[in-house]
Image: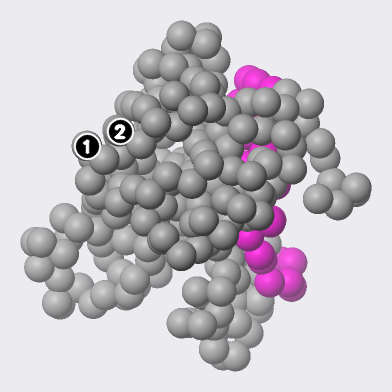
Amino acid sequence: MSDNLARYPSLKDRVVLITGGASGIGASMVEHFAAQGSRVAFLDFDDEAGPEVATRTGALFLHCDLRDVAALRAQVAAAAAQLGPVTVLVNNAARDDRHGWETVEPDYWDERMHTNLRHQFFCTQAVAPMMREARGGSIVFFGSVSWFKAQGGMPAYTTAKAAVHGLSRGLARDLGPFGVRCNVVVPGWIFTERQETLWASPEAVASTLERQCLKEKLYPPDIARMVLWLAADDSRMVTAQSFVVDGGSI
C-alpha cells in the first residue's frame, strides 16, 4: 500500500469477512484489508483465483457458492472458528450479466436474486450475533449506479441492486442498538479485468468518461479505500447511508 494512503489503527487484527474476494473489487479489498493488518477471510467459488489471492495476501480462502445458504452459513462459522468473531462484513459478491427483459423466466429471475441480493441478507444474519456480542461492527453492502441511471439491459440485476438499499437501511435500524453499522457503497463503472474484457469498448468508455465529472477511469482500489473507511472506527457514527464512488456520473 502506498505511503500516501491512510492507515487505520482500528483495523489492525480486526476480523474481516469479504464475499466474492477472488477477483476484481473483492480481491482488491482483500489486499487492502490485509495491508492494514486485519485478519481477512473471503468466500468465493473460484478455486483457481481464490488460492492465489490467499497466498499473495495471507488471507483465508473458503470455497463457497453463496447461492447455497447452508454452505454460506457453514463457511461463515468456519471463518469465525479460524480467525475469531467477525466484526466487519463486506457483502461484495455479485454478477452483472446482461439479459433482455423479453427472455427472463422465473428460474433465471430467482437465480439472479440469489446471486445479487439474497446472500447479502443471509451473510448479515450469520455474522450479526457475533457483532451483537462484541457490541459493535460494520456491515458494508454493495449497490450499483446502474439503477440510479435507469440503465436497461439487465432488469433482474438492477432490481436486486436497488433492493440492497432498503435491506441496508432496515438492518441499520434493527442492529443499531447493538452498535452495528450498515452502509452501502455504490460503485460506478469500475474497470476490472472482467469489465474490460466483456464491455469496455472505446465507445462505451468514452461515453462514461463524458458523463463523469472526473475524467478518469475508476479501478478496484478506488472502491477498496472507501470500504476501509466505513469499516474503521473513523466512521463510527455513520450508518444507514449510501456512498457513491463513480467519478461524479449521477
Q: Is residue 200 left or right of residue 210?
A: left
> What is the residue that sits farthest to the bottom in this orientation?
202
Q: Which residues are magenta?
A: 213-242
The residue wearing badge 2 is 74
Residue lying furthest right in this view? Answer: 3
Q: Position of residue 247 (x, y in %)?
A: 67, 62
Which residue type does callout 2 highlight?
Answer: Ala
Residue 191 image point, x, y percent: 60, 71
Instruction: Determine whether, in the image, residue 112 is placed left or right of residue 152.
Output: left
* Helix, strand or loop for disc 1: helix
Considering only vertical position in the picture, is 25 above or below 224? below
Residue 120 lies in quadrant? top left
Packing grade of label 2 (10 A; few <14, some 14-19, many >=20) is: few
Q: Residue 178: x percent and y percent?
A: 47, 10
Q: Nearer the viewer, residue 147 or 199?
A: 199
**Label 1 to label 2, Cα distance in Å?**
6 Å
The kind of secondary structure element at disc 2 is helix
- Res 161 seen here: no
Q: Nearer the viewer, residue 13 or 234?
A: 13
Which circle marks residue 70 in the picture? 1
Please, what is the three-letter code of the amino acid marked with disc 1?
Answer: Ala
Residue sitting at 25 percent across and 59 percent down? 112
Q: Is residue 240 one of those drawn in magenta?
A: yes
Residue 46 drawn in magenta: no
Residue 213 drawn above or below residue 165? below
**Figure check: 198 above or below 84:** below
Q: Are the residues tagged 1 and 2 within 8 Å (C-beta)?
A: yes
Residue placed farthest to the left in the image? 106
Where residue 44 sits: x, y (%)?
A: 41, 52
Against 43, is 140 above or below? above
Identity of the residue drawn at 73% across and 72% down: 216
